[in-house]
Image (spheres, grey):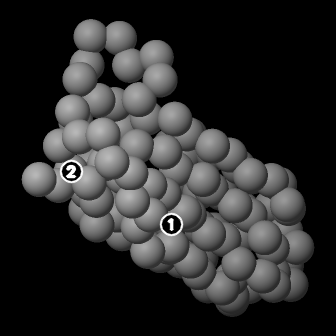
Amino acid sequence: MADMPFDQRLKWAPELSVTLDSDEDNQLIGVLIHQPVMLLFKNQSNVSVFVSDNDDFTEDEGTTMVSGEEIIFDCRGNHGNAVNMGFPSGTSFFATSIGAGATGDVKISYIYAK
């Protein structure tokens, strides 16, 4: 079994990553190949970035992360009546640098139920 909400074994998925290019907006960080249990978003760049699951950059459908910020999403905590809560496999994530001279990476690490 794989990617089932009631599975109990965890497995690291391949890390998603993009090296920022200050001349390019809305760069693809990567695509989830599994439904995550937990996600860790990391802005390891020298500028703030806007991260979204929408490739059409709009500032109200994502989050702004300052340089060095990390965000953890626990997709199983506080899920209410849902069996599982989270982004489905196949979800794409994008980063747009805010400011000139962007260098560094934006990364997403995640674990899934195997």
Q: In the structure shown, which secondary structural element does the residue marked by tag 2 occupy?
A: loop
The circle drawn on residue 94 is 1
Residue 103 appears anywhere in the view: yes
Q: Position of residue 65 (x, y in %)?
A: 74, 52
- Residue 21 % position (x, y): 69, 88
Q: CA distance from mark 1 to mark 2?
A: 23 Å
Can you say whether 22 is above or below 79 in the image? Answer: below
User: Residue at 69% of width from left, 61% of height from top?
Assistant: 42
Q: 58 or 16, which lies in front?
A: 16
Which residue occupies 41% across, 29% down? 76
Toward the front, the furthest residue is 9
Amino acid on which disc 1 is placed: Phe
Judge by depth and name the residue closer to the eye, 20 or 111: 111
Give the quadrant of residue 95.
bottom right
- Residue 108's spot in the image, x, y percent? 56, 64
**Tag 1 secondary structure:** strand
Please give left or right for residue 71 compared with residue 91 in the image: right
Q: Which residue is mark 2?
A: 3
Q: Nearer the viewer, residue 66 or 38?
A: 38
Q: Using a 10 Å C-alpha cutoff, classify the residue at mark 1 as few (fewer than 14 neighbours), some (14 to 19) or many (20 or more).
A: many
Tell me if 64 is positioned left or right of 10 in this view. right
Q: Measured along the vertical axis of the image, is residue 95 above or below residue 54?
A: below
